[in-house]
Amino acid sequence: MESPTDHLTRARELLAAHPVVDGHNDLPWALREHVRYDLDRLDIAADQRGRLHTDIPRLRTGGVGAQFWSVYVRSDMAGEDAVSATLEQIDGVRQLLERYPADLARALTADDMEEARGEGRIASLMGAEGGHSINNSLATLRALHTLGVRYMTLTHNDNVAWADSATDEAGVGGLSAFGHEVVREMNRAGMLVDLSHVAPSTMHDALDTSVAPVVFSHSSSRAVCDHVRNIPDDVLERVPANGGVAMATFVPKFILPAAVEWTRAADENLRSHGLHHLDTTPEAMKLHAAFEEAHPRPVATASTVADHLDHMREVAGVDHIGIGGDFDGTAFTPDGLEDVAGYPNLIAELLRRGWSAPDLAKLTWQNAVRMLRDAESVARDEQSRRGPSNATIAQLDG
């Protein structure tokens, strides 16, 4: 019988050959909040444990081969302010790539991902988080794609005018007519439709419309943890026919039922001190630490995440699952998955549960690369048949 040490050794060997493609990391926002992108003040070439979940040494330790960097901006930003902030986030990623070229490689395509892996560099892609980033403009959507954004989450925590969020009241009942046009234009451009954060009605509407694979960049199973941010089984069941990938997240309040109410109280504690509930600055983390001392936190583990992956595999199949940790976008992380160095612990747990090396290679690397390659193929076909859409929300939604 293999020991935990044997499982961890095998996990590291597997990740050396088939590294993790992580679907969602909020390092750009953390750098914006901490130092306004001043990389002299927060150099991720050095270990930043205690300040960030992410730095280059720990990405290497964790076996990360490709990262979708989130160019997220808060959904209480609106209009041109949201667009400008998104452009600043994209520029922040550009600064990272220019400063660390030996470790980070700009990637726009599946071929770029494979080339970076061959060079021993971490393929760096971008994903916009929330349709508010395009300010109801298909031209802005296309501009983000030109700048390198390869997925867009249709909403964040609040509805947009054309799509419903999982954490807001029902608005248009899923996607509006303009929302369906956004999905079609994303297909044409080659930008993955990300269905994390959206309401189940929006998930179903997007799956009805999209002719390219969709992605859930950081969502887990609602059957395992009944949180609105997770994916219901009736949606997971549709993912194989679409060719998409559902990437399990590590955020404790989304994966551990006991953590849901505790995190709600911790978030309210931040608000009572005048801070945004998603704040992870040192001031916010001190408040969280004091709250946790008075109210012990329910702790998720790598096994908790593995429970979600087991179920997601059962429902959607091993060809349609992946990993999206949401590091530096959450104040709390599971034991064993405290930061980006922890992926071997998750792979070791899955090995312990009997997952095969070929199936784990699909989970970590192959599914995500195939998904992007398929989206690129769809985009070429769509572009051969039609030009860009210039429809407006006023025209389609009245």
Image (tube, grey):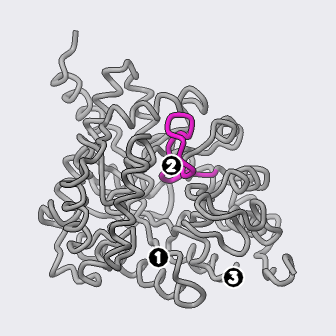
User: Which residue does the image show at 37% across and 35% down from the upper left?
Assistant: 304
Q: Is residue 136 visible?
A: yes
What stretch of residues is rendered in magenta?
Answer: 214-229
Residue 28 shows in the view:
no
Q: Nearer the viewer, residue 158 or 147?
A: 158
Nearer the N terminus, badge 3 or badge 1? 1
Q: CA distance from mark 3 to mark 2?
A: 26 Å
Q: Residues within 10 Å of mark 3 (few under 14, many from 20)?
A: some
Q: Residue furthest left?
A: 46
Q: Residue at x 47, y 76 (%)?
A: 73
Image coordinates for residue 301, horizontal then vertical, percent:
30, 37
- Give the residue number, with chain letter if any, for mark 1: 73
Q: Is residue 75 left or right of residue 391?
A: left
Note whether 263 is above or below 28 in the view shown. Answer: above
Q: Which mark is residue 219?
A: 2
Front residue of 213 and 54 = 54
Image x and y of residue 211, in percent: 74, 52
> What type of secondary structure mainly makes up the magenta span?
loop
